[in-house]
Image: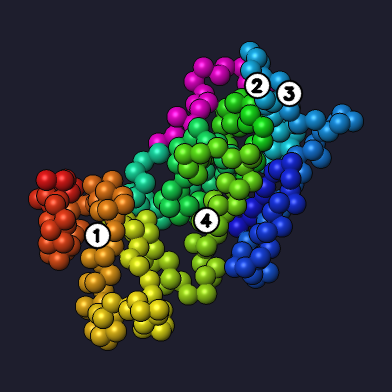
Amino acid sequence: MKIDIVSVFPEYFEVLNLSLLGKAQSKGLVEVTAHNLRDWTHDVHHSVDDTPVGGGAGMVMKPEVWSECLDELLQLEPAVIENTENIEDSADSFDTGDSCDTADSDTAPSSAGPVLIFPNPSAPLFTQQDATELSHADHLLFGCGRYEGYDARIPQYYRAQGIDVREYSIGDYVLNGGEVAVSVMLEAITRLLPGFMGNAASIVEESYTGDNALLEHRQYTKPAEWRGIKVPDVLLSGNHAKVDRFRRDEALEKTNELRPDLIEALDCAKLDKADRKTLMALGWEVSAAHPRKR
């Protein structure tokens, strides 16, 4: 996978050389290159922003600088868009789907070419489903906004050029820039690449993973008792069926408490008898297509 990142602080991404992502680069699984947006400026101050049209506080990143950069990285010729009426030009144009619906998660992104991604606090939430989908891409290009963000015509223009453009938020808060968000998305995406994890089985039961996604059960290690707190006895029993059931029930209980929306999205047809019994004990009706609170 080829990964390009554009930022006014490319040195921020030196952190990607650490840990598993650093090893993945050494093994040739991924190729990460951070570019300085200011390299595509032409003025003495290397300016990348200007005041907002219509007034207001802050500064907005200029489309002409971004376009020179993105045209080069995407190998596109400059063009003039004459009719923008039918161009989807906002994050609201995306089909965000359901955060735990992974039925199509093993398919490649809709475009066979590069995927251009901008973090944006006003965009749809980035989910495990998105990470799984994007892990099948050959080339990801991330643009890190700063200040009041980037000119809205930038994603609009590249969609009109046939580029698969995504805008994602990583949560209901605002950051100083897109660098942190890009790092978050990159970790979520690259760890799903074949050969990235030392033990591929470690990602199978994680939170938000699978057709009927739940929060993951709690984990323990040795010693069996630490400062007066014991590991649940069932985990020491050696009975794998009982351990699996204990963990499954705990995942259902934890999800019920913290993310009932994920319970509501479960497919009842894919629940076994024990799942149904646990959910009913937690106050859910499971006779319909999806659970509903009694």
What amino acid type should be assigned to the residue bearing mark 3? Asp
Mark 2 sits on what residue?
A: 57
Pair 1/4: label in front = 1
Q: Secondary structure at mark 1?
A: helix
Q: Which mark is residue 189?
A: 4
- Magenta highlight: main SS: loop
Mark 1 sits on what residue?
A: 253
Mark toward the start of the polypeptide (3 vs 4)? 3
Q: Residues within 10 Å of mark 3 (few under 14, many from 20)?
A: some
**Residue 123 vertical position relative to residue 247 in the rendered view, above or below:** above
Q: Which mark is residue 123?
A: none
Assess whether mark 3 and mark 1 are in contact (beta carbons under 8 angstroms).
no
Mark 3 sits on what residue?
A: 50
Q: Is residue 251 magenta?
A: no
C-alpha span from label 3 to label 2: 11 Å
Residue located at (59% from left, 68% from top): 20
Residue range in magenta is 75-95
Mark toward the start of the polypeptide (1 vs 4)? 4
C-alpha span from label 1 to label 2: 46 Å
- Quarter of image, res 54: top right
Pair 4/2: label in front = 2
What amino acid type should be assigned to the residue bearing mark 4? Ile
What amino acid type should be assigned to the residue bearing mark 1? Glu
Q: Of residues 138 and 24, which is closer to you in this image?
A: 24
Q: Of residues 200 and 275, which is closer to you in this image?
A: 275
Residue located at (51% from left, 27% from top): 90
Q: Residues within 10 Å of mark 1 (few under 14, many from 20)?
A: many
